[in-house]
Amino acid sequence: MEACIVNSLRSGEKAVCVRGGKFGQRWAQICESFGVVPVNLDLEWGAAIDPECIAGVLEAAPDIRAVCVQLCETSTATVTDVEAIGKLTRDTDTLLIVDGVSSVGALVFEMDKWGVDLVAVGSQKALMMPPGLAIVAASPKAVKAIQVNQPPSYYLNLQTAKKAADGDSTPYTPAISLVAGLLRSLRAIKEEGIENVWARHATLGKAMRAGVRALGLELLSSAPADCVTAIKLPDGLDAEMLLRKIEQDYGVKFAGGQEHLKGKIIRVSTMGYSGLFDVIIALSALEMALSEAGRTLDLGCAVRAAEQVFLAR
Ligand SMILES: *Cc1c(COP(=O)(O)O)cnc(C)c1O
């Protein structure tokens, strides 16, 4: 994410940062660290940005050089309509910069078709790898902007990286073992077919949400992503206790909320090598833990709702 900012923007330039959660905040923090001026669009956590709102900001301030968004804002499990935002930036000098860390390899993402200029991806989420590698892709428009820039970074200089990549190399010693691993996971994705990978995630997300609703629980997000689901907990339910129970008693790992959502939501992933039975197991553990926490529910209802989604596929 830092490589995207420091290579394409200069100190004093403005970038729209959509702040609908933890990772949107990070775009703004990175910008501030390098003197890039964030124009923050703050959303209630769980809400998705209305592209019209970005259109208005771009119209009012034509000197804005970039729009920074998350394809999936993982802290709230919300998906952004990147395609619609791309229609606003593609025939302008404004760059569209996307954080695809939890979503590329899980959610539909058409970099060229949508006019995305820079995307950052991590090895550790939908790409099914240990942490340690970050991948940045740039459009011709972004490459042009990068080539006339002097980034305030040595290691993250993308001109140096591109020059080395053009000769099938890297500027410095890369994490070879992770690159070898990434080759394997990308081959697995290619073998399944990216469209099939997207469809699988869509089904898993849909089944997870159906199960959650069957339990009478609400989703946090108004635009829920298929790779992660954020579940609002009813008042009076101790989130820490619930998370501990799910993990220790049932061996399933849910995540909690971040910042002000800590204790208010739990999150569960369906990204990467997740399959049907990961959803079934997660919902089953959630049902039992909720039941033990004293919530009245029809045991099996969430699992049944998920199975119905799978059978209707
Ligand atoms: C996980 C993630 C990152 C990387 O964050 P870390 O603090 O390195 O875990 C960045 N953006 C998004 C959207 C993510 O989900």
Image (cartoon, helix red, strand yellow):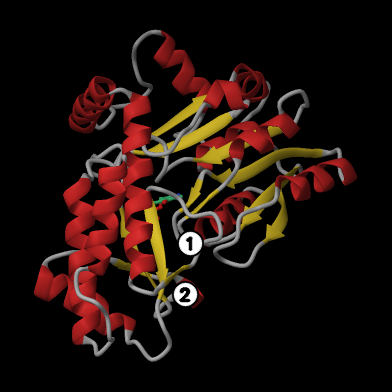
Is the C terminus in the top left, top right, bottom left or bottom right quadrant? top left
Q: Position of residue 205 (x, y in %)?
A: 36, 50
Above or below, comparing residue 286 to residue 81 in the picture: below
Q: Which residue is mark 1?
A: 76
The answer to whether any part of residue 280 appears in the image is yes
- Measuring 20% from the left and 57% from the top, which residue is drawn there? 280
Q: Quadrant of residue 203?
A: top left
Q: Are marks 2 and 1 in contact (CB under 8 Å)?
A: yes
51 or 142, which lies in front?
51
Q: What residue lies at 53% left-to-right and 26% top-to-bottom? A: 111
Give amino acid for label 2: Leu
In the picture, residue 89 is in which quadrant?
Answer: top right
Q: Residues within 10 Å of mark 1 (few under 14, many from 20)?
A: many
Q: Is residue 145 above or below residue 291?
A: above
Q: Quadrant of residue 293?
A: bottom left
Q: Is residue 77 above or below residue 15?
A: below
Q: Within 8 Å of ligand 1, the CB of disc 1? A: no
Q: Disc 1 on helix, strand or loop?
A: loop
Residue under pointer 2: 261
| Image side of residue 297 versus residue 93, left or right | left
Mark with earlier residue (2, 1): 1
Query: Are there few (<14), some (14-19), or many (20+) residues within 10 Å of tag 2?
Result: some
Residue in the picture at 71% in, 43% down: 11
Determine whether the residue tagged by mark 2 lies in a helix, strand or loop: helix
